[in-house]
Image: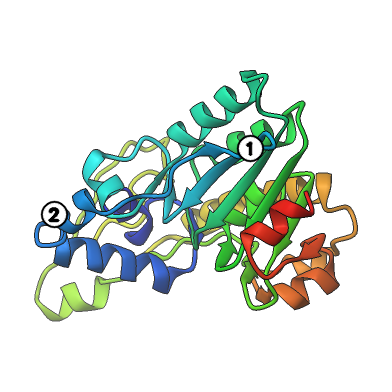
């Protein structure tokens, strides 16, 4: 998935477990052509409205904003489409309430806070439900709903942000290559993470500040609706649905979507 490349190379923060991001990228690279037909003829989860007026909006797969058609076929979730669907549900008088059905390990940062704000600002009652995983970026979005319900064995949380920048300077030196980076004197933060170089203390401090600020925004967003959650809970850990309920990250448990909708 091309939209993960910058994050995996340390060029931007990520809101997804690093191993799951790498797995998604590796699978997309491996099966980008052989699996396309299966994806084309397979059915992605679609939004729909139940008989009693509940709009169901799927958030399924690795999350990003403005993803390519191929990435969508490989299972990515485009926040532009989610936003448009939420807006349509808000405007439709036949829709009385909205349920986000989430199955996602997270994704990139861009667009996530805005979708959470959109969910929180809806005039109709909202609920987020997962019986699989609602982690990192997906948790940021799901936590903005009025209610958050999950199955006991679901994976919930991973409230944190990270950047991973490989330092290949020794490998380059061992190969007899010296990287010389010439940059403007007034921009010491420029060029951070160029292959074959090490980050300066100033660059590390700047990147640390970036991820800390995003994490602070993430926690503040969660606490707008999940007011009982303690800061110590939002430390990047992933919890079972049962444990998440005890910690106040979710408001109820339901074995499946039908039971969750029946209680909504």
The mark found on residue 37 in the picture is 2
Q: Is residue 115 above or below residue 109?
A: above
Q: Residue at 44% across / 32% down in the picture?
A: 80
User: Closest to the observer: 8 or 37?
Assistant: 37
Residue 58 is at least partly visible in this image: yes
Q: Position of residue 61 (x, y in %)?
A: 42, 56
Q: Earlier in the sequence, mark 2 or mark 1?
A: 2
Q: Quadrant of residue 53?
A: top right
Q: Position of residue 211 (x, y in %)?
A: 58, 54
Q: How is the image coloured?
A: rainbow
Q: Position of residue 140 (x, y in %)?
A: 64, 51
Few, some or many residues within 10 Å of mark 2 (<14, 14–19, 20+): few
Q: Quadrant of residue 157?
A: bottom right
Q: Is residue 68 above or below residue 226?
A: above
Q: Position of residue 192 (x, y in %)?
A: 37, 52
The mark found on residue 51 in the picture is 1
Q: Is residue 235 above or below residue 54?
A: below
User: Closest to the observer: 261 or 144?
Assistant: 261
Q: Is residue 188 above or below residue 244?
A: above
Q: Which secondary structure lies at badge 2?
A: helix
């Amino acid at each position: 998935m091309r939209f993960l490349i910058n994050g995996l190379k340390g060029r931007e923060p990520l809101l997804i477990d690093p191993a799951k991001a790498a797995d998604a990228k590796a699978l997309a690279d491996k099966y980008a052509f052989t699996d396309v037909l299966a994806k084309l003829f397979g059915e992605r989860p679609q939004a729909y409205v139940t008989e009693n007026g509940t709009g169901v909006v799927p958030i399924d797969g690795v999350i990003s904003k403005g993803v390519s058609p191929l990435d969508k076929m490989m299972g990515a979730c485009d926040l532009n489409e989610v936003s448009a669907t939420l807006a349509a549900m808000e405007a439709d008088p036949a829709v009385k309430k909205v349920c986000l059905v989430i199955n996602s390990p997270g994704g990139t940062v861009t667009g996530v806070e805005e979708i959470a704000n959109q969910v929180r600002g809806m005039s109709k009652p909202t609920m987020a439900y997962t019986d699989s995983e609602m982690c990192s970026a997906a948790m940021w979005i799901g936590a903005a709903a009025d209610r958050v319900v999950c199955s006991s064995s679901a994976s919930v949380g991973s409230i944190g942000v990270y950047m991973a920048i490989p330092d290949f300077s020794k490998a380059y030196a061992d190969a007899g290559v010296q990287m010389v980076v010439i940059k403007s004197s007034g921009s010491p933060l420029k060029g951070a993470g160029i292959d074959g170089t090490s980050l300066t203390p100033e660059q590390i401090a700047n990147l640390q500040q970036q991820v800390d600020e995003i994490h602070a925004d993430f926690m503040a967003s969660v606490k707008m609706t999940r007011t009982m959650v303690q800061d110590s809970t939002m430390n990047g850990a992933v919890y079972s649905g049962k444990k998440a309920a005890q910690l106040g990250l979710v408001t109820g448990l339901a074995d499946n979507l039908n039971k969750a909708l029946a209680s909504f």
